[in-house]
Amino acid sequence: LEKKIAILEGRMPQKYPEVKFLGYKERRRILVTGGAGFVGSHLVDILMMKGHEVIVVDNFFTGRKRNVEHWFGHRNFEMIHHDIVNPLYVEADEIYHLASPASPPHYMQNPVKTIKTNTLGTINMLGLARRVGARILIASTSEVYGDPLVHPQPESYWGHVNPIGPRACYDEGKRVAETLAYSYAKQEKVDVRVARIFNTYGPRMHVSDGRVVSNFIMQALQNLTITVYGNGKQTRSFCYVSDLVDGLLGLMASSYTLPVNIGNPVEHTIEEFAMIIKNLVPGCRSTVATGAAVEDDPQRRRPDIAVAEAHLHWKPKVSLQEGLQRTIDYFKEELSRTTLYNNQTY
Ligand code: NAD
Ligand code: UDP
Ligand code: UDP
């Protein structure tokens, strides 16, 4: 507290991560919707460290101020508490449009809000991009492929989505977001980029995020049963968050305008994944239990990243082992905070 008061009173300089100095001509004003979320906050860090001005817009539905609080007060940083379902008038040179819940339990908890965010919210951001002439990158998802009948999934695959199932609010919401992007590109000449993001993990995922990586790590760290939904034969391919952020930056900078898969093609069954995590937590006494299957759970998912390799010269660098180790270390810290703050996670 002493230190904080000293900073506020200006007796001590506020310490920020190191920021490069950019001249007026190179510095861009970049809007990041959903910038207080898991992926958004990592993207914000890189953009800030590169020396750009960053405006974060977030309604804190699934994100937290804590993810970006290390930038509060920095002259290049601005945070706006706003729901993008409502119009937003700011100036920007580039927009990364990431605002949307991403974890199945989160988006299923409020399906109407999820659709509104991905449709009305995306219209507003495209309208903003149109008004200010900004390039806009839409965060789409591998879920546009649904429960895929083609494996691995190339961008040319149209998908296999149940339009009225429990995941539809997200899958169809993102499909409409893509359609909106290309309609604005065609009709209004908006400069769009579309990233189809595959399962991503890393530090700053919320302990109660509900996605498989955070669930399994939290269970393994507490010696609780690792809960595999269904028989565990379904597969996913996991990308470490820094690799994803590199891919998003590469796509924004590239002249390629069609959708691009960004993900790590190393594929595992969920059962294997449970064992990998268990073995990475020293002394873990958790057992792995299979349970009821989730409705409409995609059975296989793995990105074909030939387009990203050819057009962005991008491929993931961080191995699953290394990425998981960093994520486990993060969740260990989170667990100790939880105990510290009277079992409240915040
Ligand atoms: P997240 O839930 O951590 O972050 C989403 C952020 O958007 C949160 O900060 C949330 O508060 C904000 N938000 C939600 N609705 C909003 C609204 N109406 N107005 C303003 N802000 C709003 O999720 P994430 O994992 O960081 O995902 C970021 C983006 O990437 C999402 O668009 C998601 O669909 C996409 N994506 C993520 C993954 C992944 O594995 N993480 C995979 C595919 C796609
Ligand atoms: N919009 C916004 N910010 C802007 C410009 C537009 O939020 O800076 C919203 C606007 O309210 C509208 C939507 O984006 O609902 C789509 O904008 P567009 O210009 O395509 O449509 P119009 O204004 O003609 O309805
Ligand atoms: N899953 C699981 N146990 C959990 C959470 C998820 O077995 O505690 C499974 C889920 O059924 C799916 C996979 O892990 O097959 C990935 O789920 P997640 O919610 O992380 O993301 P999805 O890829 O389904 O959007």
Image (cartoon, grey):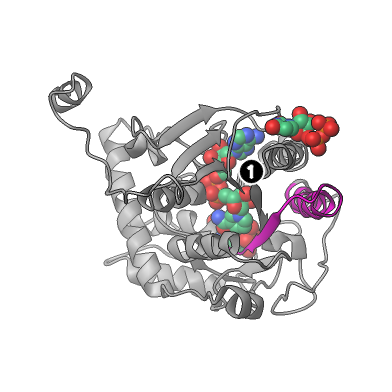
- Is residue 320 toward the left or the right of residue 114 in the image? left
Picture quarter with ligand 2: top right
Q: Nearer the viewer, residue 105 or 14?
A: 14
Q: Image quarter for residue 73?
A: top left
Q: Is mark 1 within 8 Å of ligand 1?
A: yes
* Range shown magenta: 170-199
Which quarter of the figure is the C terminus placed in? top left
Which quarter of the figure is the N terminus placed in? top left
Taking the spot 73% from the left edge, 66% from the top edge, the residue there is: 258
Residue 55: x and y in percent read 50, 37
Instruction: Check disc 1 and report the residue beneath it.
Output: 100
- Please tell me whether residue 187 belongs to the stretch shown in magenta: yes
Using the rendered image of the protein, determine whether residue 293 is visible from the camera's viewpoint. Answer: no
Report the number of numbered marks.
1
- What amino acid type is highlighted by mark number 1? Ser
Taking the spot 59% from the left edge, 27% from the top edge, the residue there is: 82
- Please tell me whether residue 269 belongs to the stretch shown in magenta: no
Q: Image quarter for residue 206?
A: top left
Q: Note whether 312 is above or below 111 in the view shown.
A: below
For numbered disc 1, what is the local secondary structure?
A: loop
Taking the spot 32% from the left edge, 38% from the top edge, the residue there is: 70
- Label 1: how many residues lie within 10 Å, few (<14), some (14-19) or many (20+)? many
Using the rendered image of the protein, determine whether residue 6 is visible from the camera's viewpoint. Answer: yes
Taking the spot 58% from the left edge, 73% from the top edge, the residue there is: 312
